[in-house]
Image (cartoon, helix red, strand yellow):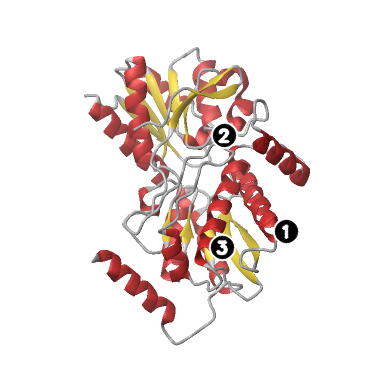
Amino acid sequence: MLRRFLMAWLVGVLTCGGAQAEPGVTPERVRVGTVQDLSGPIAMLGAPIRDGMRMRFEEANARGGVHGRQLVLAVEDSGYDPKRAVLATRKLLTRDPVFAFVGTLGTPVVMASMPLVLEAGRPHLFPFSPHQATYAPLHPLKFQLFAPYQDYMNAAVRAMVARGGYRRVGLLFQDDDYGHEVKKGVEAGLAARGLALVESVGYKRGATDFASQVARLRAAECDLVVLATVVRETVGAVTEARKTGWAVDMLVTASGYSAQTHALGGAAMEGLYGVSVMPLPYAEGANRALADWIDRYRSRFGTAPNIWSAMGYNVADVFIQGLEATGRDLTAARFARAMEGLHTTRDFFGSPEYRFSADDHLGNRHGRLARIENGRWVLISDYLQ
């Protein structure tokens, strides 16, 4: 019943006022929007995401596009600022409208901009924000690829406690939607093991000094610290702990699972645990298809790809599969119906299979544990349940 109501609402929204051209779609092209951080504290994530998406679109265009249409990627910079993200989103909705938003980066940015996208009747797809709100409650136009913070951190904490016998778990979290969503997952995982957080301490987005937070966690005698941090803040927090001689085990979310973490942090990052929702694209040991992709990326952008490049490419690829399944007669409603029947296969990155249905717009719920050993991330578990 809910499903029929939602689809009827969508059809009504998209047909109100008579037949009109679908925003962002012409006979020759499909215009797609994404909002990234290209100048703020997580620009080191936003730029490779953009480039990975751009590379996949360019490949599709070189083969004639999708159903004869070329793909155009319109990129706006949020600076990881929700207010700027709202302005950027409005620009992509009104000045030269886009058909869909794909791979927008950052939970604070997504929480501020997603309502505008949905209100305008545009698909909101695969944001780099594994927040429950990006796929639930069910909405015809919102789809998510990435395992949600609550689910994978619940499973990861349970697995870590079982492995290490930890009894005093603490949390360092970014004090916003991202950090609070992680906290819910951590608390649920601990409760399942008969435990509770002994200390949790927040920091503001963009913070660079973690001395006081680390001191509080150490004073609480934590034997495991969970980090709801992104790359730069992960390096800062772990480095601060090691600088003070505190060798406590630490577990970071998938937002810190990046080669940039050990590249920036060096030896201090050894032994850091993390959650992987997609394997890192290391050149060493790569299969033939991945090695070829790495070479093509390096040739195109003049630098080696990282996990964010791979995930940008991945979200663009799944979007293209949705377009292909929709057919030439492209509307938001038809695209949404096609997405609900999409089931992808494992790709050369080793990505999980993504499966959607009319009742479930979340493609994957699971992550794996990883650990930095000898300067690189090594997977140490299968997908966690």
Position of the N terminus by quadrant: bottom left
Q: Amino acid at mark 3?
A: Ala
Mark 1 residue element = helix
Looking at the picture, tell me which residue is in the foreground, 243 or 335. 335
Tell me the residue at 43%/86% (across/down): 17
The residue carrying mark 1 is 62
Which image quadrant for residue 339? bottom left
Q: Amino acid at mark 2?
A: Arg
Which image quadrant for residue 374? top right
Q: Could you tell me if residue 222 is visible in this image?
A: no
* Image location of residue 215, percent across then percent down: 42, 21
Tell me the residue at 58%/72% (across/down): 24
Q: In the figure, is residue 316 to the left or right of 369?
A: right
The residue carrying mark 2 is 232
Q: Quick one: label 1 or label 3, which is nearer the N terminus? A: 1
Q: Amino acid at mark 1?
A: Ala
